[in-house]
Image: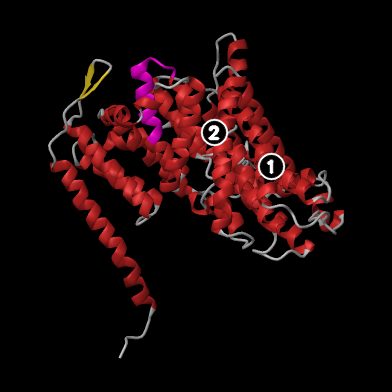
């Protein structure tokens, strides 16, 4: 007689494979530690050794990678585990590990940006601006897809891409329902929902605030290469690259999923523009718009103001972000309550970035990054510049398929590229920028990023529907980053 199926039995069946992975990974880590240290690599007439600490750090990195790929633990918990293993094996002191991660100023920047994103969404300003921009595109399905890509790109330049996807999703679903299209059967439904993900992904590379890997790259460049990248430095390459992706993304979506409708049979009132969106801005929207616009202007103008001031007073972009967030809570403004911020801010993402910084710096400091970089990435860095940009984007996008996290991908690849740039005398920004952009360009698998999962959850397209268009978009994105590098003399 078979035992009845219970929640406890289900949990036990789900737990055993995860415990097996953890046990096997622990054995693998022990094997790496016990193996003899490999001989030094000979590169450019120089010997590049791997110390015991470096070998141990590679073992910890391998453990983290396996846990991140298999998701036996949440991403942020794996990052914390990595931080704990570093002092356990005598690679660095616990206080230093915590200080390098949680003490990095970029964390305050990320907290400020996330709080601003919460306000943008909660106040209704995000919905209002989305409806306003989409109201100009008319009722042609192809133009609607163009509008979603454009709106998603423009918004996610300043708001995290997940938040933008969450804003676009209900608008898109409303349009599809009123048009009477059926989930999984409509090309227009598939194309529109995929555009809800792609637009935010395009815009996420345009500015430092677009997504987590951008901030991680800026932090690594400052700590490991003594290179400060300003808001304008990033935008110089990021904005052209993201804008170039819009027409190519639109072309891929409309060719792969040609809309079966010539015209949407819905009026302006039915396109999702509710009376509340036609009404004047409310108090919360006014304050959110004012504070967000002021923050953006300060981010862009900060280097110019520093040059113009007599004492060269430089306001760090981290302080500007956190200052903008603080303003939202002041008496008389109070756009947000702290309980709302606590509930809506993705604190796990903050922990993941803290842990990622600690692990990345430890891989660099032990010399493991230098050894690993020359072992696997040396040939890419030696190629002509434009081809190098193209190859780096493709390589990082391929890595992203396995790691399923923008921040995890950036944590692994950016320190390796920085050490190569330092060894070859190349400006590290020239090879880290394309890698940082590619870390958040997850077009192929739904599971690569929550930005894809949000529109997928509406049920209008399958995982298979996204694969081929995603591969084409990945190639197109690599081309766009390379062209942007040429256009701006990067």
Residue 425 forms part of the magenta stretch:
yes
Residue 298 forms part of the magenta stretch:
no
From the viewer's perspective, tell me whether residue 149 is left or right of residue 101: right
Query: Is residue 170 depicted above or below 44 in this figure?
Result: below
Q: Residues within 10 Å of mark 2 (few under 14, many from 20)?
A: many
Q: Position of residue 140 (x, y in %)?
A: 81, 50
Tag 2 secondary structure: helix
Magenta stretch: dominant SS? helix
Q: Position of residue 159 (x, y in %)?
A: 61, 41
Residue at 54% across, 57% down:
463
Residue 397 or 322: which is nearer the viewer?
397
Q: Is residue 38 visible?
A: yes
Residue at 39% across, 34% down:
413
User: Of marks 1 and 2, which one's residue comes earlier in the chain?
Assistant: 1
Magenta residue span: 413-427
All told, the count of numbered labels is 2
**Residue 478: assigned label:** 2
Residue 401 or 412: which is nearer the viewer?
401
Q: Position of residue 305 (x, y in %)?
A: 62, 16
Q: Position of residue 19 (x, y in %)?
A: 27, 62
Query: Is residue 91 depicted above or below 281 in this figure?
Result: above
Query: In the figure, residue 117 lies in which quadrant?
Result: top right
Query: Is residue 10 depicted above or below 144 in this figure?
Result: below
**Residue 401: assigned label:** none
Query: In the figure, residue 285 lies in which quadrant?
Result: top right
Extreme residue toward the top, this view: 310
Residue 150 or 282: which is nearer the viewer?
150
**Residue 251: assigned label:** 1
Tag 1 secondary structure: helix
């Amino acid at each position: 007689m078979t035992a009845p199926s219970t929640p406890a039995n289900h949990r036990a069946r789900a737990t055993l494979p995860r415990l097996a992975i953890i046990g096997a990974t622990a054995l693998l880590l022990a094997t790496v530690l016990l193996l003899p240290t490999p001989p030094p690599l000979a590169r450019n007439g120089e010997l590049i050794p791997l110390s015991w600490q470096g070998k141990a750090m590679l073992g910890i990195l391998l453990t983290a990678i396996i846990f991140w790929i298999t998701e036996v633990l949440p991403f942020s918990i794996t990052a914390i585990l990595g931080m704990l293993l570093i002092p356990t094996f005598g690679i660095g002191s616990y206080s230093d590990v915590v200080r390098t991660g949680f003490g990095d100023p970029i964390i305050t920047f990320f907290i400020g940006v996330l709080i601003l994103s919460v306000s943008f969404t909660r106040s209704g300003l995000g919905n209002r601006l989305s409806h306003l921009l989409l109201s100009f595109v008319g009722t042609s399905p192809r133009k609607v897809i163009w509008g979603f890509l454009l709106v998603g790109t423009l918004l996610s330049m300043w708001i995290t891409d997940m938040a933008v996807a969450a804003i676009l999703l209900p608008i898109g679903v409303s349009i599809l329902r009123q048009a009477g299209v059926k989930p999984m059967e409509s090309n227009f439904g598939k194309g529109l929902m995929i555009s809800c993900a792609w637009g935010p992904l395009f815009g996420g590379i345009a500015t430092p605030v677009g997504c987590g890997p951008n901030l991680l790259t800026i932090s690594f460049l400052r700590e490991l290469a003594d290179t400060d990248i300003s808001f304008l430095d990033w935008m110089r390459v990021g904005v052209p690259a993201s804008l170039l992706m819009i027409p190519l993304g639109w072309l891929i979506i409309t060719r792969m999923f040609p809309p079966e409708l010539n015209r949407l049979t819905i009026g302006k009132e039915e396109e999702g523009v509710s009376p509340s969106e036609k009404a004047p801005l409310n108090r919360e929207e006014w304050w959110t718009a004012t504070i967000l616009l002021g923050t953006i202007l300060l981010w862009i103008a900060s280097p110019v103001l520093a040059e113009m001031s007599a004492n060269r007073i430089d306001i760090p972009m981290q302080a500007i972000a956190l200052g903008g967030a603080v303003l939202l809570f002041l008496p008389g403004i109070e756009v947000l309550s702290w309980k709302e911020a606590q509930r809506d801010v993705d604190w796990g993402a903050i922990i993941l970035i803290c842990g990622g910084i600690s692990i990345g710096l430890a891989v660099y400091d032990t010399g493991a990054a230098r050894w690993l970089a020359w072992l696997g990435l040396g040939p890419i860095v030696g190629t002509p510049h434009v081809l190098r940009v193209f190859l780096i984007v493709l390589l990082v996008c391929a890595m992203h398929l396995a790691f399923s996290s923008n921040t995890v991908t950036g944590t692994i690849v950016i320190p390796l590229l920085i050490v190569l740039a330092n060894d070859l005398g190349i400006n590290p920004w020239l090879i880290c920028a394309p890698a940082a952009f590619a870390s958040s360009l997850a077009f192929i698998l739904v599971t690569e990023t929550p930005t894809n999962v949000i529109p997928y959850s509406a049920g209008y397209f399958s995982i298979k529907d996204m694969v081929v268009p995603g591969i084409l978009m990945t190639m197109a994105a690599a081309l766009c980053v390379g062209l942007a590098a040429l256009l701006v003399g990067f």
